[in-house]
């Protein structure tokens, strides 16, 4: 009886977030190889979905793949041949590092600077988490 009350109280104190983990499906990357270059056709769409600056994502991708890149409208052109799987793996690594809160696992976060250091601030649970600096 006492134990049940305790559980109930603990449950009430928990923020509702934990019980409503919503789906966060990053759009599939549409990748084509043109000559010795790789084009991500829907790059802007992906950036908009994960709500991050395109240049920040590209800096990360370029470094991870060791490839120079340039933007071309909503597309991105990387020098080198990379398959869809490679691109999507790197994008999910970006999402894990810079989008999803490590505390509550929700994607409702913002990147912000504290004393010039980039951190991830979670709008859902309030956590401020360190992110890898680029
Ligand atoms: Zn959080």
Image: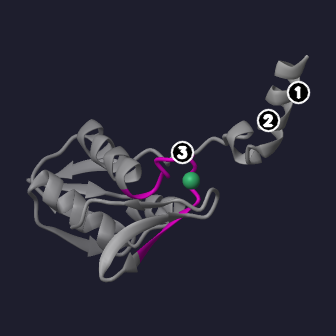
Closer to viewer: mark 1 or mark 2: 1
* Residue denoted by label 1: 5
Tell whether circle 1 marks a residue whose Cβ is less than 8 angstroms from ligand 1. no
Residue at image position (33%, 43%) is: 88
Residue numbers of the magenta segment: 98-112
85 sits to left or right of 46? left
The residue shown at (14%, 60%) is 63
Using the image as rendered, state which of residue 81 and residue 100 is in the foreground.
Answer: 100
Mark-to-mark CA distance, 1 and 3: 28 Å
Q: Secondary structure at mark 1?
A: helix
Figure quadrant of the C terminus: bottom left
- Mark 3 element type: loop
Is ligand 1 less than 8 Å from the beta carbon at label 3?
Answer: yes
* Dot label at residue 11: 2
Structural crowding at the residue carrying mark 2, measured as other residues with C-alpha within 10 Å and reported as few (<14), some (14–19) or many (≥20): few
Q: Which residue is mark 3?
A: 105
Q: CA distance from mark 1 to mark 2?
A: 10 Å
């Amino acid at each position: 009886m006492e134990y049940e009350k305790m559980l109930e109280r603990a449950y009430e104190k928990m923020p509702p977030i934990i019980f409503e983990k919503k789906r966060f499906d990053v759009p599939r990357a549409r990748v084509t190889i043109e000559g010795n270059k790789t084009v991500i056709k829907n790059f802007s769409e992906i950036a908009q979905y994960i709500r991050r600056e395109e240049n920040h994502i590209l800096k990360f991708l370029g470094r991870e793949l060791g490839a120079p890149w340039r933007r071309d409208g909503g597309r991105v052109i990387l020098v080198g041949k990379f398959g869809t799987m490679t691109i999507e793996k790197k994008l999910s690594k970006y999402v894990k590092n810079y989008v999803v809160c490590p505390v509550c696992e929700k994607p409702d976060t913002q990147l912000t600077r504290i004393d010039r250091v980039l951190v991830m601030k979670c709008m859902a649970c309030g956590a401020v988490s360190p992110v890898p600096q680029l």
